[in-house]
Image (cartoon, rainbow, N blue to C red):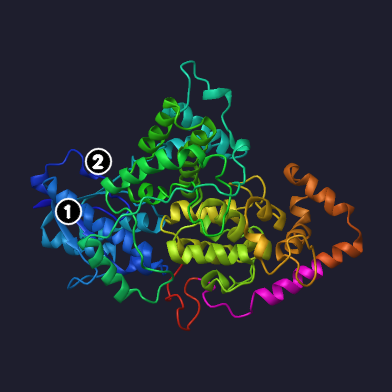
Amino acid sequence: MTILIPVLGDQLTLTLASLRDVDRADAVVVMMEVWDEATYVRHHQKKIALIFSAMRHFAEELREQGWTVDYVTLDARGNTHSFTGEVARAAKRHRARAIRVVAGAEYRVRQAQDGWAADTGLPVEILEDDRFVCPLPDFYAWAQGRRELRMEYFYREMRRRTGLLMTADGKPEGDKWNYDHDNRDTPPRGVNYPAPERFAPDAITKDVLALVGKRFAGHFGDLEPFALPVTRAQALRALDHFIAAALPDFGRYQDAMIAGQDYLFHSSLSLCLNLGLLGPVEVCEAAVAAYARGDAPLNAVEGFVRQIIGWREYMRGMYWWDMPEFAKRNALKATRPLPDFYWTGDTDMRCLAESVDQTKREAYAHHIQRLMVLGNFALLAGVDPGAVSDWFLVVYFDAYEWVELPNVVGMSQFADGGMVASKPYVSSGAYIDRMSDYCGRCAYDVKKKIGEGACPFNALYWDFLARHEKRFAGNARMRNMYGTWGRFSDEKRAEYRASAANFLETLIPAAPGWARLGEGTGEGAAPAAPRSA
């Protein structure tokens, strides 16, 4: 009789709460590769390979630490292909007397865990995931009774809690909380962009690549080349490389987009954080130490720290604050299908083609590509936020619903009606032109506002404002936009709206290929399954 400790694919941390204060001789760790998790949305092939490889490497680390590990591979005989089924089977195999597990990070996983006691007839201890800076009860206490739940004020609380970039007298380093204003430069020509740290696949990873190539070949994206970190040692190397090579210029260029430069000065450490290979505080402390040594400027370090203990923690809190309703929200009543070019990249809009191509190859795009190109177009076009959220969950190696859904449904698509963001993140082509080199060789003219050859973002931007004028005209942060719209003649307004309607009719076909999870029956269609909520 033993204690069964299920460890999930995003819990790859040796100090995990369920592994603490347990006699290893009296416990079995069970890890499971299950079809349900790989296919509840058709995850990018590279993402599946990343998680399976990291899991198999972590199992080896646990064994080296003296743990007994029962590892169920995807093709193992009798695999039920669900967490619940595999926990029940393992409990019988090992004659378990109890189950001890860390709470799943996603709503549907947590719901399943709540049923394990009834499914197995065993006591189940579900522990809080304390790898985050802000425990959920603390977030709820912070949120309770507030008229607006703005990240900036939550972030300041996290700075005080951790002491990161705080002076001895309790003030923010440099006397400012936020240096975002200094982080909007476009890199000049000739900038030397540091290549991210790459890791050659070992025997374990090669086995996983063969499995994924065989079983998930119909999924979106390129499986190889594969060079992502899959162990804590590799994650630490990736962190050190980012701190030394990219952090100094990360801040001022973090909003830039350059064709052919997939990473620029970004870290892509989110994949290591979300798997559990790195902890949020240790990553921030490494950046703060670089600032203390004079190796990185304050604006870069503050911006990096804000992404991790600000946005990342805030999004987790907002997700659990509003689930399961969050997944269903559609405040702007957007209903258009997701365009096929989000899957194929087959569009003459170069910013979208470049961003989708990079996403297919790398399972990665940085936050401005996600927000102000891919998300911006979907919001302007009135695409169903559920379809947009499903897409983002599929395509990125760092996408887990707890962080992806509030970012997309809330921040990107404003489908939550303003719980996350105080205004919608929309722009015309001018912003993309200012922050990128995409527009220079685009088939559309970013300077042209309407008609044939004009950048679609321009007419769509004004059409979006017109469609939602009643909702947003009173928004203080949108007053200038509507002031400009109000000065347009009736004829000019009609021209913008007619041009937008023509673009939408041309760019978004009536029959989408992968419009919503569970819809579509053709080649490459998503398998029939309910949404996670």
Residue in view at x 20 percent, y 58 percent: 121
Whether 435 is drawn above or below 507: the answer is above
**Disc 2 marks which amino acid?**
Thr
Magenta region, residue range? 497-516
Q: Residues within 10 Å of mark 2 (few under 14, many from 20)?
A: few
In percent of width and height, residue 453 lies at: 75, 70
Residue under pointer 1: 60
Instruction: Look at label 1 and name its amino acid.
Output: Glu
The answer to if 502 sits in the magenta stretch is yes
Apparent side of residue 487 relative to residue 203 in the rendered image (left or right): right
Q: Is residue 211 above or below residue 333?
A: below
- Image point (63%, 69%), residue name: 335
Does the rendering let one see residue 105? yes
Looking at the picture, tell me which residue is in the foreground, 282 or 318. Answer: 282
Vertical side of 152 occupied by 339: above or below: below
Whether residue 123 is situated above or below residue 393 in the rendered picture: above
Per the image, label 1 sits on a secondary structure element best described as helix
Count of numbered tags: 2
Give coordinates of residue 528: x percent, y percent. 43, 76
Residue 495 lies, in percent from the top left, at 85, 67
Taking 43 as reference, is 491 left or right?
right
Is residue 333 at least partly visible in the picture? no
**Snapshot quadrant of residue 384:** bottom right
Dividing the picture into quadrants, the one containing residue 39 is bottom left
Give how far across and how far down residue 18 sits, in percent.
24, 44
**Is 36 on the left-hand or right-hand side of 206?**
right
Q: In the rendered structure, does residue 424 fall within the stretch colored magenta?
A: no
* Label located before the other in sequence (2 or 1): 2
Q: Check disc 2 and report the residue beneath it.
A: 15
